[in-house]
Image (spheres, rainbow, N blue to C red):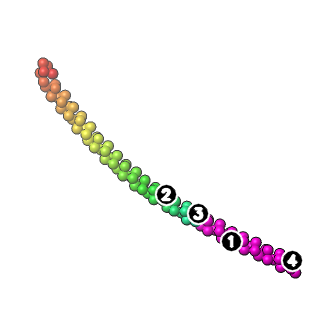
Amino acid sequence: MGLALFWFTLQVQFAVGRLLISDFWKHIMEAELLNLEDKVQQLAALCRQLRNENRQLRQDLLQTQQENQQLNGKLAGAKDRLASLLAKLPEELA
């Protein structure tokens, strides 16, 4: 009877130890999952920020391209007017 009781006690202690270890790993895994969740949220926020920044940069680029076209048009007009004025000058002055 003494050996059976000893064996039973040993099995109970082993089972309790396994549960304690299981709880320990459970807490570690929960902490890791919370950390991972935080990183995913940070990544999502960064993606939103970069998407907004990209949208703004595309708008700025479009506006700059339109301004560039307008300035090129003005430059072409000025070149034409200058060529016209040069053509009207007498040969000796040109």
Cα distance, mark 3 to mark 4? 43 Å
| Quadrant showing the C terminus | top left
The label nearer to you, 1 versus 3, is 1
Q: Indicate whether 90 appears above or below 43.
A: above
Label 1 sits on a secondary structure element that is: helix
Q: What element carries label 3?
A: helix
Q: Are marks 1 and 2 in contact (CB under 8 Å)?
A: no
Give, as a three-letter code, the residue at label 1: Leu
Quick check: 32 left or right of 53? right
**Residue 32 - label:** 3
Instruction: Answer left or right for 7 relative to 77.
Output: right
- Relative to residue 2, is residue 64 drawn left or right? left
Q: Is the magenta stretch mostly helix, strand or loop?
A: helix
State if disc 3 and disc 1 touch (CB < 8 Å).
Answer: no
Q: Nearer the viewer, mark 4 or mark 1?
A: 4
Which of pointers 3 and 4 indicates the residue nearer the eye?
A: 4
Callout 1 crowding tier (Cα within 10 Å): few <14, some 14–19, many ≥20: few
Residue 75 location (% of width, % of height): 23, 35
Question: Percent from the top left, x then y, of residue 32?
Answer: 58, 63
* Left/right of residue 10 with respect to residue 50 in the rendered view: right
Residue toward you, 20 or 51? 20
Going by the numbered disc 4, the residue's amino acid type is Leu
Secondary structure beneath label 4: helix
Q: Name the residue under label 4.
A: 3
Q: Which residue lies most toward the top here?
A: 92
In the rendered image, residue 26, in percent from the top left (x then y), is placed at: 64, 68
Type of amino acid at the residue the image marks with label 2: Leu
- Dot 2: within a 10 Å radius of its alpha carbon, few (fewer than 14), some, or many (20 or more) residues? few
Check residue 91 for magenta coloring. Answer: no
Numbered tag placed on residue 34 in the rendering: none
Name the foreground residue: 50 vs 4: 4
Query: Which of the two labelled residues, at mark 2 and mark 3, occupies the earlier sequence position?
Result: 3
